[in-house]
Amino acid sequence: MSRSPRSSARVNLEHASVLLIDDNSQALDILSSVVQGFGVREQIRCGSAIEATEILRRRMVDLILVDCAMPQMDGYDFIRWLRREAPQPTCLTPAIMLTGHAAPSSVQKSRDCGASFIVTKPITPGVLLQRILWLASDEREFVKSETYVGPDRRVRNLGPPLGVPGRRAGDLSTHVGAAVEANMDQADIDTLIKPRRVAL
Amino acid sequence: MTEAKVFKYRTNLARKMSAPGGRSVEEALGAADSALAHHRDAAMEALGVILSRLEEACAARRQAEIYDGAAALLDLAGFFDTGPLHPAAFSLCEISDRGSVWDWPSVEVHVRAIRRILGGGCRETDETALLLDGLVSVRARLQNRSPARQN
């Protein structure tokens, strides 16, 4: 599968506000530079997830990038809070979690927290940008249940969104698309839905 | 049990990214790559500091600090092409994660290997390939050890 987006495609993040959360100030600086390179003008930087929850109670952002390992509230608990306790429509905000070591002890936590994507390091700008482009054309539905709140995790059969490199021939899509045939006549439609007596 | 609600939604991100304007992916990646390059020297220096702390923790047998140190190495190294450093730090994370069989000699071997890799500028060489092979063997040996034989 292609790991980098098509270079001819365009990315418009000029008007998007991005929340960056990492307790390591150096990692935060690096991430901030990368995101700035993508064309993001408004960045909000947080040194802790708790600080981020306070910001999100007051205002909306368009994208969240959060590190997984942090003291007090880690990335998993933050995403869980975002999906379950943040005000509408902030709780629907796309969130990418960055993780250095996906510890076996936290595999279930990462699966259940509700992140839009979990990206494991080493992470290149190409991989990060690809995930952001995927989010822009994400076809997944949002699920709210007792045990899970977040984007539908059943992405295996959908593959990457339409038009994104890496789709396989058998990948399904929820995209309806534009009509390719002439519209049906209203009379024909009425006939189709008109109740009829059926002789049994 | 309440029923699950499933609904379609369109995010502000999707709306804003579909507006005309912006820059080409090539330009965006070029700008991000060059911004990243500016951080590399400082990051390599920071990796050295983290590793020194890890060596101290190892010498003083402070078990609780090993995983956090290894994860900090991996976190920072993960933004750059650090060649063999990344798999070595990952391997140290694996053997020091909760639930793993604890073995100080294996931890020490990892920390010394990471020091050699960092000292060599994280270049991929025959020596680093051998070191990584060795770390894989150490990890496999640990994984095959049952917790009952730990003490």
Image (tube, grey):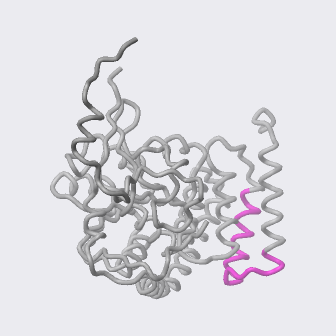
At a point 68% along the width and 65% down the height, the residue shown is B87
Please, which residue is most extreme toward the top here?
A200
Pick the residue in front: A103 or A10: A10
Residue A66 in percent (x, y) is at 39, 59
Q: Quadrant of the C terminus of chain A?
A: top left
Pick the residue in front: A55 or B15: B15
Magenta-colored stretch includes residue A87? no
Q: Which quadrant holds residue B69?
A: bottom right
User: In the rendered structure, which segment of residues is drawn in magenta?
Assistant: B107-128
Magenta-colored stretch includes residue B119? yes
Q: Main secondary structure of the magenta part?
A: helix
Position of B3 with respect to A125 (left or right) is: left
Position of A153 with respect to B128 (left or right) is: left
Position of B56 with respect to B141 (left or right) is: left
Residue A28 in percent (x, y) is at 39, 70
Pick the residue in front: A112 or B2: B2
Q: Which quadrant holds residue B109?
A: bottom right
Please, which residue is most extreme toward the left here?
A58
At a point 25% along the width and 68% down the height, the residue shown is B16
At a point 41% along the width and 53% down the height, the residue shown is A116
Q: Which quadrant holds residue A19?
A: bottom left
Residue A5 to residue A73: above or below? below
Residue B102 to residue B123: above or below? above
At a point 31% along the width and 81% down the height, the residue shown is B22
Position of B9 with respect to A165 (left or right) is: left
Residue B36 in percent (x, y) is at 47, 82
Residue B52 in percent (x, y) is at 60, 71
